[in-house]
Amino acid sequence: MTTVVWFKRDLRTRDHAPLVAAANRGEPVIALYVIEDDYWQQPDTSGRQWCFIQDSLDDLDKQLSKAGNQLVVLRGTVIGALSELKASHTIERVFCHQETGGQWTFERDKAVIQWCSDNQIEFREWNQFGVVRRLKDRDIWDKAWTELMRQPVLEAPGSVPFAGAIQGVAWRDIQPGATAADRCPDRQTGGSIRGETLLASFLERRCVGYQYNISSPNTAVRACSRLSPHIAYGTVSLREIYQQAKAAGIHRNTLPRKQKSLTSFRSRLHWHCHFIQKLEDEPELEFRAMHRELEGMKTGPNDSERLQRWQQGQTGWPLVDACMRSLQHTGWLNFRMRAMLMAVASYQLWLHWREPALHLARLFTDFEPGIHYSQTQMQSGLTGINALRIYNPVLQSQKLDPHGEFIRRWIPELAGVPAEMIHTPWLMTPAQKAKFGGNTYIAPVCDHEQAARAARKAVGDFRKQHVSREETGRVLQRHGSRKGPHQTRPKPASQPPPDNQLSLFD
């Protein structure tokens, strides 16, 4: 009688309920991960994501070996892998965590559940995030999230009965799908050990001033927790992060400044699940606007030149281009700058949200579908319940990178330009360009102020003509935030906080 523990976005042994439940039965366990080639052909997947998973699988295999087991990695489809295992073992049950992914993983999960039913195999899922499947009332969500976060963290099982050696694939050398050209050498390293090390350093010292330092691309690299890819792929559990952050914040020796910082950090863990719940409740958000009437605001093909210049970091707006080039190189960017990239694509460049969203998804090592699609739509003005956030790329640059440090690092064309000119290099005279450089940096794709005014007017006019109270009310009722357990119906004032406080994009 064998239990298969199917690992997905939960690549750890600590606080892993399916693994603990399987180990406690005292029967053989197969710890399974499947490399699904069709998944890696999806338009929002990339090599940097796979390489992070490879690191994490290696670490997971080491964790399992300490418990007397080993990771079995197969390639193909999950149903094919389970069928192969069923041919050689008496598979009685499949245990796993719930996953709120894109449409592809949703359909795959339904197919696996049906296969288990057809083969009289028990299929059981556990919740690892504060996301409620088949949620009937958004008003109860906050209570459910709090209850899950307060449950005890499960220790990694000391012994996991071994089902016997199974021939898997040499996964350390595999590059599935179209991922080989995108290894992103400066991406973050995966694995539970690395995640726990980051958590410890953040709680010990890096968290101080968190809420003030996460907006600037210069300070955010250190001030942010940098746990987002570890949460996305489950190398460290959200519950453990929450409980450790809370314990550190209420310790009698913790200074008030640090307490405030950790309170701010914990709020982002809450927002993390709040946004994933949106995709769980309405999977179509991957493909269409949250406010259905706003889907028709932009029709026809995107301007291919504008899209390409934005993708390549060649818009001519220094901070925008520096952010894109940095993201291409490292696989990470702080949330405020992510929001700016998407907003500039949507408003100043007037691009339909879908292609920019997919491009950013591929660049994010920490891509989390539930957060990503909700956020890219929010920054594109497609929720109908949030204020427009049309970023001024020059003002953002002057405010968040006043001395041009970040810009010079990622745009070598402007390395010699002084701070007072680096935010608007197109205003430099020929003599200034000859003296300081900047001749090779591209001119702006358009006048950003004029484009912003045009976008604001276009959005306002469309809303007046095509947006109904009924659809706005539906979105607010289904996806609007709630202040707390005593508020039974959402109100316009109870919307998410400003853009740099939305979710754990750090």
Image: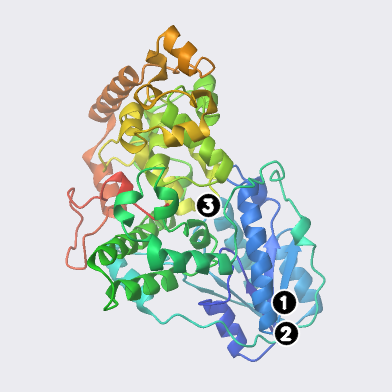
Q: Identify residue for label 3.
A: 102
Residue 278 appears in the rendering: yes
Q: Is label 3 in a helix, a strand or a loop?
A: loop
Mark 2 residue crowding within 10 angstroms, few (<14) / some (14–19) / many (20+): many
The residue located at (31%, 45%) in the rendering is 499
**Residue 404: x %, y % from top left:** 40, 32
State how far apart marks 2 and 3 are (Cα): 33 Å
**Residue 292: x %, y % from top left:** 36, 39
Of labels 2 and 3, the one closer to you: 2
What's the residue type where badge 3 is placed? Answer: Gly
Residue nearest the observer in this picture, 314 or 232: 314
Q: Identify residue for label 2.
A: 162
Residue 134 appears in the rendering: no
**Does label 3 or label 1 sit earlier along the sequence?**
1
Q: Identify residue for label 1.
A: 70
State how far apart marks 3 and 1 are (Cα): 29 Å
**Does label 2 or label 3 sit earlier along the sequence?**
3
Residue nearest the observer in this picture, 49 or 292: 49
Whether residues under marks 3 and 1 lie with C-beta atoms below 8 angstroms apart, the answer is no
